[in-house]
Image (cartoon, helix red, strand yellow):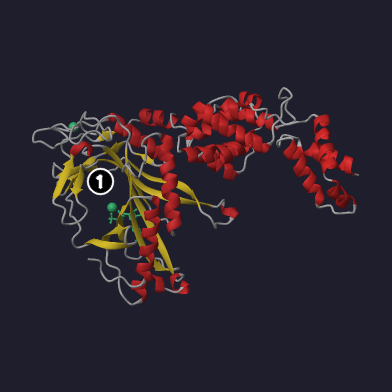
Amino acid sequence: MPKSTPEAASLAPDVLAKYEPVIGLEVHVQLLTRTKIFCGCSTRFGDPPNTNVCPVCLGLPGTLPVLNKRAVEMAMRASLALNCTVHDHSRFARKNYFYPDLPKGYQISQYELPLATNGHLEIEVAGLPAAAGARKRIGITRLHLEEDAAKNLHEGFSQSATKAYIDYNRCGTPLSEIVSDPDMRTPDEAYAYLTTLRQILLYTGVSDVNMEEGSLRCDANVSVRLRGAKEFGTKVEVKNLNSFRYLQKALEFEIERHIAVLESGGRIAQETRLWNQAEGHTVSMRSKEKAHDYRYFPEPDLLPVHISSAWREEARRTLPELPEAKRARFVTTYGITPDIAEVLTDTQNLANYFEASAGSADPKRVANVIANWVLARVKDKDITIDKWAELVPPSQIARIVALQSTEISTGGITISTSTAREVLGKMAETGRTADEIVAAEGLAQIDDVSAIEQAAREVIAKNPDNVAKFKSGNEGVFKFFVGQVMKATHGQANPQAVNDILRKLLS
Ligand code: ADP
Ligand code: ZN
Ligand code: MG
């Protein structure tokens, strides 16, 4: 049962403002190896339960683990991308506890000598002065390797569930645990840290970091202290955060709960709590006294991990360009704003699509077409940018931009902005090229002055009343004439030419 929770919402803003939250995150990511960390079983997601198992990952007596080199390499890449020191020597340890999802009775993890320590990443923080670059560095305490446990499935949704099932397919999947320093001060910063971390891991290709499928899992540690205090307050660990939003909500709730307890003269108990999304609060799971004593000791069945400097440097050399560097390069190379650069570097595939499109057209306009029109349609259609690129290859984005531009020779064809947007949509539906659609549907903008003049004369002849109004000084009527000429030309007349011609004819 939840302990009685002081009503957090009743706290006045000036009471909340007296305290400073302190947050540190522990993140587990599944590494994208084909096989498990200590045996040759497949790590494929979604296979029938208990089909990817063997005596090693089932923990049968007499079996011995063999370390998957690829898992070490991936964890090393992640460590380097996070600016960690990757140690020459690290060591596995046994973390002992009993649970049905852990057939050996211990988890092989790293404890005293982790693979990597002392890294950092930079988050963007709204509200920081621009002089500080609006960025904040968050320390990474350590990154270590461990094996995942099996997955428990319960029939029914409550304590009274009648059956529990265990799927050992996941047991032995390689994980990296990434522990941050207690450097975050708001739920927003925690959110920014997790999104930044996720993006770096995605770029590095070590994990698909999918929170829904459980390949990215996050536990949050949070405490509060009076502003200006040197010592940290007592922390609480919050588990069961299955989405970025839950993380933020759970932190907001916990911070207010801590402050309410302290304000009412109470003390925070060091404990582990669970986020209950349905009810919007955290619930005590276990107290410090009931915390596991894991009785860690060095794993006797595995040799220490040795990483040569040659191997480490090779990993460093083959790291891709990371999001932050890519954003900075886009701003300087293409002259686009940091905001648009951020949008376009969301994933490497999107960034590549932009760069391929910008090769032969004005990059700023290409950036706008992709950031606004393309991404809106990709979202509508709920497809990946790769799928989109099959329908609308980069060369066609360049063409759409060129067709709107009067400075670039387009073979005499120009289209308006609204037409360009429409053509883009049609390309995505039909896979036809921009030129095919413009030609087939007669969408080219009318620059032919005589055709526009003809239409303008007809509009004027049909509307003597409005002509009279305009001539008597009613400037507002001019818009009416422009609208009528555009209508008569099916929106294809060059708007500037329409304006010029009407001014001439009506004067
Ligand atoms: P534990 O021994 O309980 O595992 P650690 O010192 O290893 O605690 O820290 C675990 C996580 O908790 C780290 O992410 C760390 O940054 C964070 N943390 C540590 N102390 C605090 C605190 N007082 N308030 C908030 N987070 C904290
Ligand atoms: Zn196995
Ligand atoms: Mg710890």
Say whether residue 142 is left or right of residue 356.
Answer: left
- Residue at horizontal 36 percent and vertical 41 percent from the top: 210
Viewer-closest of 351 and 157:
157
- The number of callouts visible is 1
| Residue that protrudes farthest toward the left in the picture | 61
In this orientation, does residue 231 appear? no
In this orientation, does residue 64 appear? yes
Percent across and percent down for residue 44 are 27, 32
Viewer-closest of 427 and 109:
427
- Residue at horizontal 60 percent and vertical 37 percent from the top: 369
- Residue at horizontal 44 percent and vertical 36 percent from the top: 203
Q: What type is the residue that disc 1 sits on?
A: Tyr
Mark 1, Cα crowd under 10 Å, few <14 / some 14-19 / many 20+, is: some
Q: Quadrant of residue 373?
A: top right
Viewer-closest of 268 and 419:
419
Say whether residue 267 is left or right of residue 64.
Answer: right
Percent across and percent down for residue 261 are 33, 72
* Residue located beneath label 1 in the image: 111
Vertical placement of residue 241 versus 336, above or below? below
Location of the N terminus (image quadrant): bottom left
Percent across and percent down for residue 477 are 81, 50
Mark 1 Cβ and ligand 3 under 8 Å apart: no
Q: Quadrant of residue 116?
A: top left
Percent across and percent down for residue 392 are 54, 28
